[in-house]
Amino acid sequence: MNRDWFATARTLSEALPFLQRYDGATVVVKFGGHAMGDDAAMAAFARDIVLMKQTNVHPVIVHGGGPMINAMLERLGVESEFVNGKRVTDAATMEVVEMVLSGLVNKRIVAAINAQGGKAVGLSGKDANLITCEPADPALGLVGTPSKVDPAVLNNFKDSAFIPVVAPIGAGADGETYNINGDTAAGAVAAALNADRLLLLTDVAGVKDADGDVVTELTPDTVRQLTRDGVIAGGMIPKTETALAAIRDGVRAVVILDGRAPNACLLELFTPHGAGSLIRNA
């Protein structure tokens, strides 16, 4: 008999305690990075999500789409203004952002999950007033920060076969449409759902220490100290800030992990060694 079959059976057996641990748990997954632009990686991600749902984990997907937005703006000849390195989202830009996130990207993820035997449903934060926003910075135009997340529509999916896929678009108090950072939207959704886990899929292996090694487990105090010391810097700062805010607001733990790694979500949830950097209270 093929030895690989024995290894597969042993892996499944060793996963049992973790399958029991996450039975009925809500897991919010922020999907982004280069994995979104690769068909094989997208299919592998979708397969993992369908398997999670099959084992009675309740995944909620929140996605980004920055590279796709940039490409479409360039194709349409929409010029962008930047303030301190951040794109100003005016009305013309917002139309493209909503078209790409709620249309192209969202439906591509939905289709990938459905192709693996799942039942995905695409939403944006505007649907059923899921995410209400306020301006993040007036200088940036229609860039929003979630001020309220109503979990009712997502809770309706929890005891069903459907997997919600949420585009990070929100509505303002007067009906304006806002573009939300994908990590920020995922953190706010996870907090509103009191999620057991928030998985932030990125293009790096996790939070690294001063020697460049991935730190597998951190407390909020450790994250703050590494940030003060300049060890956590650049693009990792907003991700760890999202993690700290989510934990403060009720998420049990946040994991920053490499979305390019095969079966990253399954490794994190269903194996003893996990994947990436786990952040939670001591």
Image (spheres, rainbow, N blue to C red):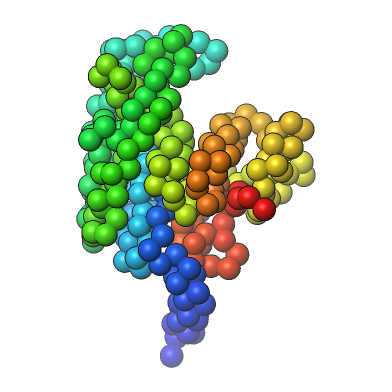
User: Percent x, y for residue 7?
Assistant: 50, 80
Q: Nearer the viewer, residue 75 or 96?
A: 96
Residue 143 vertical position relative to residue 11 in the rendered view, above or below: above
Among all residues in the image, which is located at the extreme bottom? 1
Using the image, determine if residue 125 lies above or below residue 9. above
Residue 14: % across, % down:
52, 77
Residue 102 in percent (x, y) is at: 26, 33
Name which quarter of the figure residue 143 lies in.
Answer: top left
Q: Residue at position x 31%, y 21% from top?
A: 172
Q: Quadrant of residue 2?
A: bottom left
Residue 221 visible here: yes
Looking at the image, is 279 positioned above or below residue 126?
below
Which of the pair 225/38 is nearer the observer? 225
Q: What residue is shown at x 33% (from left), y 32% (from top)?
A: 131
**Picture residue at 37% right of the left edge, 24% below the top:** 133
Residue drawn at 71 percent across, 43 percent down:
222
Q: Where's the N terminus, which quadrant?
A: bottom left
Q: Is residue 276 left or right of residue 42?
A: right
Residue 124 position, x and y percent, is 27, 35
Visible residue check, residue 115: no
Q: How many circles with numbers are drawn on the protein?
A: 0
> Is 27 situated left or right of 240 in this image?
left
In the image, residue 77 above or below residue 23: above
